[in-house]
Image (cartoon, rainbow, N blue to C red):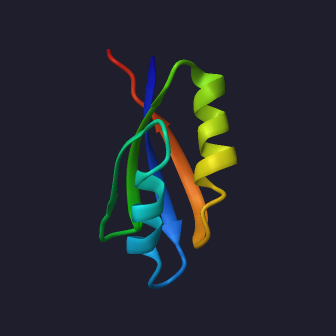
Amino acid sequence: MVQAYILIQTEVGKAAAVAREIAGISGVKLAEDVTGPYDVIVRAEANNVDELGKLVVAQIQAVEGITRTLTCPIVHI
């Protein structure tokens, strides 16, 4: 299992709507709108890195209002 935080920048005024829509995507465990340089932070999981990439590119980045994403895989050191 691969887990990651996905940091999302949105168009002005779209953070809450983007977070709500992303929260309904399979594989997304948490989606919250926040303040700071990013507008939404998502916690997601997938079976492997390839599936995580597909989740981000095909589903999350397809949400209207997103301008940029940064995927941060979780590591256990």
**Left or right of 16 in this view: 66:** right
Q: Which quarter of the rendering shows the N terminus?
A: top left
Q: Is the residue 4 above or below the residue 36 in the image? A: above
Count of numbered badges drawn on the protein: 0
**Left or right of 45 in this view: 33:** left
Identified at 60% across, 44% down, the residue is 56
Residue 34 drawn at (x, y percent): 30, 66
**Left or right of 40 in this view: 61:** right
Residue farthest toward the bottom in the current orientation of the protein: 13
Q: Is the residue 35 above or below the residue 43 in the image? A: below
Identified at 47% across, 55% down, the residue is 22
Q: Nearer the viewer, residue 76 or 57?
A: 57
Quadrant of res 77 = top left
Identified at 40% across, 63% down, the residue is 20
Identified at 67% across, 36% down, the residue is 54
Q: Nearer the viewer, residue 76 or 45?
A: 45
Residue 3 drawn at (x, y percent): 42, 28
Residue 24 drawn at (x, y percent): 44, 51
Q: Is the residue 21 above or below the residue 4 in the image? A: below
Residue 67 drawn at (x, y percent): 61, 68
